[in-house]
Image (cartoon, rainbow, N blue to C red):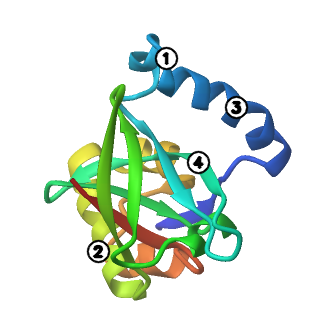
Amino acid sequence: MVRITSSVPPLWLLHLINPVVRRLLQGPLHSIVSGAIVLAEYRGQKTGNVYQSPISYRLLDGAVTAFSGAPWTRNLKTGDEVDLILQGRRRRTRVEVVEEPAAVANGLYRIMQEIGPRRLGFWFGFDIRGLPQPADIQAALTGRRMMRFIL
């Protein structure tokens, strides 16, 4: 039996950890986390303020690919320019935001085939029991979007 549940850390824990991760990603010790986490720098849609959010990622079809349902992702629209701090280097990218549930599930499924369900669950906030198929993943992705940052 396949079971997938969300295992995103509580908000209070993210507020404690994210400033540390931001500093690590921008400093000489970035290699500690930069193989799995990227720092996205983007502008707020209403305020125009610059924000930074660390996000787990994988390369998929040559694009830095991330999945999230966090409120900050509503600031990203397809075609927006987003700076990434990727493996210690700043890179200007264009984002493609994918919200169609089947396409998001397919992207996550392809990454799962590459890295396995346990690592996928750990890095992208799921507790996965069994070997899920795309339909199983789609059911668990309610409210999540896929962001593809084109280098």
Residue 8, how many percent across, how many down? 66, 53
Residue 66, how many percent across, how many down? 41, 57
Q: Residue furthest left?
A: 61
Inter-mark Cα distance, 2 to 3: 32 Å
With respect to residue 34, does 139 lie above or below? Answer: below
Q: Which mark is residue 19?
A: 3
Residue designated by label 1 = 27
Residue 86, how many percent across, how many down? 35, 36
Inter-mark Cα distance, 1 to 3: 12 Å
For badge 3, the amino acid type reads: Pro
| Residue at 69% in and 76% down | 46
Q: Which mark is residue 83?
A: none
Q: Nearer the viewer, residue 32 or 40?
A: 40
Tag 1, which secondary structure? loop
Q: Nearer the viewer, residue 72 or 121?
A: 72
Residue designated by label 2 = 106
Inter-mark Cα distance, 4 to 1: 16 Å
Answer with mark 2 or mark 3, whichever residue precedes in sequence.
3
Answer with mark 2 or mark 4, whichever residue precedes in sequence.
4
CB under 8 Å between discs 4 and 3: no
- Please state if 113 lies on the left or on the right of 127 as rendered: left
For badge 2, the amino acid type reads: Asn
| Residue at 67% in and 25% down | 20
Q: Which mark is residue 53?
A: 4
